[in-house]
Image (cartoon, grey):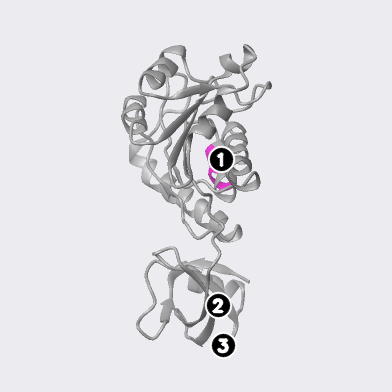
Amino acid sequence: MQRYFYDGLPDESNQFIMNGEDAHHIIRVMRMQVNDQLIAVFSDETSAVCHINQITDDNVFCAIDHLIVNSPELPVQVTIAQGLPKGDKLELVIQKSTELGAFSFLPFTAERSIVKWDAKKGAKKVDRWSKIAKEAAEQSHRHHLPAISAPISFKELVTASKSFDTVVVAFEEQAKNGERSLFSKALENASAGQSILVVVGPEGGLSEREVTQLEEAGAFSCGFGPRILRTETAPLYALAAISYHFELMR
């Protein structure tokens, strides 16, 4: 059943109107008809099976049949702080990390970032990233639509990291030295309902100076297994490990 995020809440009679790109998708792409069903996720992150009452040129009028009780969300809120990578790698990270349960994304510029952020063109990129996250969240039946910020400086990242319960930094030097336990220990110290920040550097990784600054702010610098991962692979590894720890081992 097709799923759509609705930016609002149903009215007192449990009805609402889909418009914009979602209405276009329902009418023109899916070619749905009156009485066809869809799943709507509302702004309070509740979701419901609904049916279509009426279709006009630009609007789809829907009514709730029943609420969906079970939530597919991770027990912890995981934010991916990704050093700006080259090309469309960040799009891949956003898409796959959303499927794996990421709560939000915090791109940042690092010492070794090759890409230079153009603030004038940035709004369009953030909009594209948000659209990719929305499509991935719908595909993976999420109840939460991850927020994506415009890239921040590394200094701003260090400050932001202090608001998280647990901060994990992917540091390839730890992996090269055979360190394999700190990531697991960091997850053991975390609890359901808390927030976790996963920091991943760009292609060249984080510098020792950057890692030190994050550690001084309370972060764990960890190796993600014995192999050296690409920048676009590391956040997916982290989310899979977090899912295993908090969902499959319970």
Q: Is residue 38 left or right of residue 112?
A: right
Viewer-nearest of discs 2 and 1: 1
The residue range painted magenta reads 90-95
Residue to which mark 1 is pinned: 93
Q: Determine the main secondary structure of the stretch shown in magenta.
A: helix
Image quadrant containing the N terminus: bottom right
Of callouts 2 and 1, the N-terminal one: 2
Q: Position of residue 63 (x, y in %)?
A: 47, 83
Mark before the other along the chain sequence, 1 or 3: 3
* Amino acid type assigned to the residue bearing label 1 in the image: Val
The span from disc 3 to disc 2 (Cα, nearest Å) is 10 Å
User: Dot 3: within a 10 Å radius of its alpha carbon, few (fewer than 14), some, or many (20 or more) residues?
Assistant: few
Residue under label 3, please give it: 34
User: Element at badge 2?
Assistant: helix
Secondary element type, mark 3 = loop
Q: Nearer the viewer, mark 3 or mark 2?
A: 3
Give the distance between the C-alpha atoms of the residues marked 1 and 3, in whole angstroms: 37 Å
